[in-house]
Image (spheres, rainbow, N blue to C red):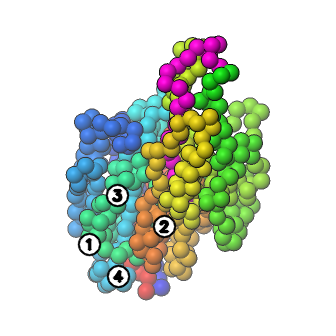
Amino acid sequence: MTAVTIDDTRVHDTCATAWDGIVPVLHDYIAIPNVSPDFDADWREHGYMAQAVDLIEGWCRARPIPGLTVEVHELPGRTPIILMEIPASDPSTGSGPDDTVLIYGHLDKQPEMEGWRDGLGPWTPVLEGDRLYGRGGADDGYAAFASLTAIEAVHAAGGVHARCVVLIEASEESGSTDLAAYVEEFADRIGTPSLVICLDSGCIDYERMWVTTSLRGMAEGILSVDIVTEGLHSGDASGMVPSSFRIIRQLIERVEDSVTGEILVPELHTEIPTGRAAEAASTAAEIGALADHYPFVEGARPATDDPTDQLLARTWRPTLSTVGADGLPPTNRAGNVLRPRTALKLSFRLPPTVHPDVAIEALTKVLTTDAPYGAQVSFDHVQGAPGWNAPATAEWLESAMSTASEQAFGRPARSFGEGGTIPFMGMLGEAFPEAQFLITGVLGPDANAHGPNEYLHVPTARRLSMAVAHVLDAHGRRS
């Protein structure tokens, strides 16, 4: 590997100056309620996604990066993407002029969620100290800004980088349903990346760069039970007509042990790789119990107290979360009625190497076969997203990540398995098996992505931009 000559002071100063200007733009971005299409069927008519795209596109176009091109594309019936290309700083860098770094992020958002504290709200950006509160700043609006800032810093510091393609999508929170079409449409532009950088992941603390080595997959659908055609007086019918809620409880007991939370469908399990188990043990030995960060009510406790088991439970074991319900009136409007129907949206997180199609097929069979009392049962509106398990890390990247974290944060990088899902990574892992991956992000344990009081830790975003600049330079100098 060629000796690194990038000027760290210039990297630091460039990123610091850029982020002073980025924070006000992120204020404006947070204020736009551009929730993902799954949560706003009329997203095109509302125009919020277009507003977010226009805002980010405008900022990107103004960056003083040699050769930068910024394009917005919208295939028929699809959400838009922002596609940016930056030519190699020196065509002789890396593996030659066709060598490519693909940098990924998204700009669509999760819906509002209840529980924001006084003075905060999903579309009300508030900067308190180092925290910029509001929906989407950390997940994942900052990504486009951090990506170009890192590239700009490489140039300012006298570094080198290979050709870069930056792809910012607008359907990630809906399972990246539109992304495959764009990857196919622009396959020639994307090329065959030797390095993929994704800024949509998390971190365990804000003291170093955390590198994600695995992501869970996802399978979800709506489980519905219909037992009668209309609501009935509960005093008149109960005891003779079974409750749709009781039936749905029985069905869920087929797939989840209600006492332990263990998933009972074998197809959703996999053997934990030895290396990932060792990684979890090493990380747990340093950070302790990750679940201690979560806002438990007084007297409550996590499902497991063992720090290593906590990390493995959130990455390599399947789980079920019931994330929505239909057919249940609010408690202040609930009459004494035996309801005709109950529907629950079930979200299963899958170990990284379990294919979602296999999981969905198994779940559908278990949930809909031999319905109690002959009830009408369906498991539909299903969708899945693949997980991802990182390939072996090249020596140059291992060294680059350590150096980058030391330079930007003052501490070496650490790795861990992330509990969330980034569908694009599974897609890329299959498409480009020879690529190296840097998956990282700014979402600490209390940043609360998808929930109330979500925030972006601004210093971490700035430092991560610096770290990415160092990795880009190392990639450009590798031999």
The reply, left or right, for residue 103 in relation to residue 204 is left
| 87 in relation to 287, above or below | below
Q: Give the percent coordinates (x, y) of residue 247.
A: 63, 34
In-front residue for pair 216/291: 216
Residue bearing the label numbered 1 = 188
Residue bearing the label numbered 3 = 179
Dot 2 falls on a residue whose secondary structure is strand
Q: Residues within 10 Å of mark 1 (few under 14, many from 20)?
A: few
Residue bearing the label numbered 2 = 438
Q: Give the percent coordinates (x, y) of residue 79.
A: 29, 49
Q: Quadrant of residue 103?
A: bottom left
| Circles 4 and 1 in contact, beta carbons < 8 Å | no
Residue at horizontal 46%, vertical 48%? Answer: 382
Measure the C-alpha gap from mark 1 to mark 3.
Answer: 15 Å
Under mark 3, the amino acid is Leu
| Badge nearest the viewer, 4 or 1 | 1
Dot 2 or dot 4: first in sequence order is: 4
